[in-house]
Image (cartoon, rainbow, N blue to C red):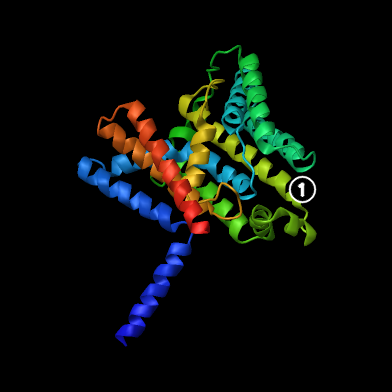
Amino acid sequence: MVAGTAFKQQNLLRVLRQSPIFYPLIGLLAVSIIMVFASDSFLSVANITNIMRQVSIIAIIAAGMTFVILTGGIDLSVGAVMALAGTIAAGLMVAGLNASLALLAGIGVGIGIGVFNGGLVAFAGMPSIIVTLATMGIARGFGLMYSGGYPISGLPSWIKFFGGGTVLGVQMPILIMLVVYVLAWVLLERTPFGRHVYAIGGNETATRLSGVRVSRTKLFVYILSGFTASIAAIVLTSRLMSGQPNAGTGFELDAIAAVVLGGTSIAGGRGSVIGTLIGALLLGVLNNGLNMMGVDPYVQNVIKGGIILLAIYIGRERRS
């Protein structure tokens, strides 16, 4: 009886270790425990809420990035797309367009750039890193041209709701982040599209030969990436109450880091959006805790870089 129980426990542990979220969750718990001992105020409701609010924008962007990376691609344009979408939306509001329509226009900008990226990658066969690197420069340039390089302020007061309002006691950035992840999880785990995304990352040639429309699927994942970047733009624009053409610099790297820390293979084919959310929270906890401990920002970059390398190494070992 004891031997049978031990065998079941070993099987359960083996199953847990095979889950893509096992190591990210262990990492989040380990870092959180360290921060609890390092600061008495870490576990306060106000601080936990602050962490989730701070990570919401990166987490929203990372949700779309997860789909791209699962197919074996990359999207370096998301930070610039977020800035452009927010700047365009703010500019249209100030110009007199209905605020709701302006926000929809900002979302349309994100979707449009996603179509552009996806079309070049999926149908023209261009490398995603080159396409999105070029698009990053184009989007950033258009945002600066449109705004003259200055923030666009004077937005309607109700716009502040998306960045600072609450619903049933939950701050809107957190609520928007959770809704995005619920929808992303359903799309990835409960639809044929999600299975195709995993299959393309695992073996694109075999997936194409099996009858899957690979190009169409890849196009859609870049559209999703642009869409989530524009949703993040709404949250950021609302929080700052202005369109910032220089916003989002480096956000693409933080989003990629969240995806990788969440257990998604950078080569594609393995991972989950829940893992990405855990990865984003891990980054948030790390940033918050190191700031509370008074660690030098330069040292923080070294620590975070080392943790990302460790996550990639663990992922490689699990595949071997």
Q: Residue at x 77, y 48 (%)?
A: 215
Return the residue nearer the eye: 5 or 119. 5
Residue farthest to the bottom? 1
> Left or right of 14: which side holds 110?
right
Q: Report whether residue 177 is seen.
A: no
- Label 1 is placed on what type of residue? Ser
Quick one: label 1, few (<14), some, or many (20+) residues within 10 Å?
Answer: some
Return the residue nearer the eye: 24 or 165. 24
Q: Position of residue 265 (x, y in %)?
A: 55, 50
SS at mark 1 in the image: helix
* Quadrant in the picture for the N terminus: bottom left
> Left or right of 203: which side holds 178?
left
Q: Where on the picture, by quarter, is residue 208?
A: bottom right
Q: Residue at x 44, y 47 (%)?
A: 311
Q: Where on the picture, by quarter, is residue 125?
A: top right
Residue occupied by mark 1: 215
> Left or right of 113: which side holds 246?
left
Return the residue nearer the eye: 287 or 12. 12
Q: Residue at x 57, y 20 (%)?
A: 245
Residue 290 in the image: above or below residue 97: below
Q: Where on the picture, by quarter, is residue 55?
A: top left
Residue 8 in the image: above or below residue 251: below
Q: Position of residue 75 (x, y in %)?
A: 62, 37
Q: Position of residue 124 (x, y in %)?
A: 79, 38
